């Protein structure tokens, strides 16, 4: 009996020691991240919110800076930002859900799915859903529009308002950059068309699809999409760019939300979204494997892309999304009119990093993410 009590006491001491060690490590991480972000903010390189966590819990959260410079409203952890191109991971997930429900197949052709649309020109007949998800469709990006629409950083284009039919028709008339399956060419238009396909498949607006299929199941309480600039939503941060010569902050220019069905979210919700990429809470293991696999191995060796995610295998480095760590991770960021964003899931939830920023041209989002991740992974 005394022998059992002895070893039980040793076990209790070991558990307590491990707990203290874990607390000390977390406290050290918090101090290092605080020091990093405060310094970045003081040098005018960061204004936004950050959440860092793992599969178990959030280990760090911070909001620094101003949400609205007219009213001097400070940022709070629950402020929503335009998540920019992180929305591609949401779109890709919705497409994979439609595949799981047998509503669509990855090798379905764009021209077949949009056969009811009366577009003026013809999309490449061989363009598939898979190619649109992987940016190998040959569809152009914003640089494919004419000079008049591209002037002043595409201001005229961004102020156009399209119906789904009009937008599909507009994109159909743009010159392709290559034959489908031949080249990785990042195309926002490809993902905009995927949104139109989803609305056609489900006969529901994208905002409702996002809410019913992703936000409610994952309890993303700060995430929404809208196609109306007249909608007023609470706790949405304004975005700005800085003019160094005039020493003035300029509020972001108007963008018509129908172009890409903008998604707004908080870093807390993005942390939950990143966490869902490592478990079966939303997508099946098979779908996640397809989503997080490199589909460009036969096309290019410089970029690794899945469906809505840049993919790193821990062995090779690629020019897009390189955090300079030898670990497996998925990553995506974005930049839209003063908003910037970044979301990373390292080793299926060892660390999940969500960053949202609203001082566009002052922030190097990949450099900041590198600093945060290297702080976390530096033993």
Image (spheres, rainbow, N blue to C red):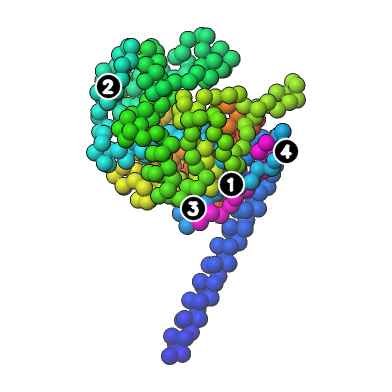
C-alpha span from label 3 to label 2 = 45 Å
Magenta-colored stretch includes residue 177:
no
Residue sitting nearer the eye, 122 or 178: 122
Q: Which residue is mark 1?
A: 78
Give, as a single range, the part of the protein colored magenta.
57-68
Mark 3 or 2: the one toward you: 2
**Image spot of residue 53 (x, y percent):** 52, 51
- Give the main secondary structure, helix, strand or loop, of the magenta stretch: strand
Residue at image location 58% in from the left, 62% down from the top: 23
Residue at image location 51% in from the left, 76% down from the top: 12
C-alpha span from label 2 to label 1 = 42 Å
**Image spot of residue 262 (x, y percent):** 49, 32
Tell me if residue 301 can be seen.
Answer: no
Magenta-colored stretch includes residue 59:
yes
Q: Which residue is mark 2?
A: 116
Mark 1 is surrounded, within 10 Å at the Cα level, by few (under 14), some (14 to 19) or many (20 or more) other residues, namely some
Q: Which residue is mark 3?
A: 54
């Amino acid at each position: 009996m005394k022998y059992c009590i002895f070893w039980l006491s040793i076990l209790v001491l070991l558990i307590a020691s491990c707990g203290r060690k874990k607390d000390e490590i977390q406290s050290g991480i918090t101090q290092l991240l605080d020091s990093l972000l405060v310094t970045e903010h003081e040098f005018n390189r960061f204004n936004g919110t950050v959440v860092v966590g793992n599969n178990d819990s959030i280990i760090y959260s911070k909001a620094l800076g101003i949400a609205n410079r007219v009213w001097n409203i400070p940022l709070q952890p629950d402020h929503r930002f335009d998540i920019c191109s992180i929305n591609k991971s949401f779109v890709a997930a919705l497409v994979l859900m439609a595949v799981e429900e047998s509503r669509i197949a990855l090798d379905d052709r764009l021209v077949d799915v949009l056969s009811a649309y009366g577009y003026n020109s013809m999309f490449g007949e061989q363009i598939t859903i898979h190619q649109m998800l992987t940016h190998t469709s040959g569809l152009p990006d914003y640089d494919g529009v004419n000079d008049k629409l591209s002037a002043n950083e595409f201001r005229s284009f961004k102020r156009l308002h399209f119906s789904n039919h009009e937008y599909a028709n507009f994109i159909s008339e743009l010159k392709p950059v290559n034959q489908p399956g031949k080249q990785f060419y990042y195309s926002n238009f490809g993902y905009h068309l995927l949104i139109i396909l989803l609305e056609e498949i489900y006969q529901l607006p994208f905002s409702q699809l996002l809410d019913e299929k992703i936000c409610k199941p994952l309890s993303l309480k700060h995430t929404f999409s809208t196609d109306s600039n007249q909608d007023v939503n609470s706790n949405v941060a304004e975005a700005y760019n800085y003019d160094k010569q005039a020493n003035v902050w300029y509020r972001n220019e108007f963008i018509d939300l129908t172009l890409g069905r903008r998604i707004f979210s908080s870093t807390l919700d993005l942390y939950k979204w990143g966490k869902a990429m490592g478990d079966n809470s939303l997508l099946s293991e098979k779908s996640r494997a397809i989503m997080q696999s490199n589909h460009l191995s036969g096309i290019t060796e410089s970029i690794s892309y899945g469906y809505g995610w840049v993919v790193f295998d821990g062995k090779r480095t690629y020019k897009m999304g390189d955090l300079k760590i030898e670990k497996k991770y998925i990553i995506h960021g974005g930049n839209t009119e003063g908003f910037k964003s970044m979301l990373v899931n390292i080793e299926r939830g060892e660390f999940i990093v969500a960053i949202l920023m609203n001082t566009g041209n002052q922030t190097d989002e990949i450099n900041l993410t590198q600093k945060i991740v290297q702080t976390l992974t530096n033993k």
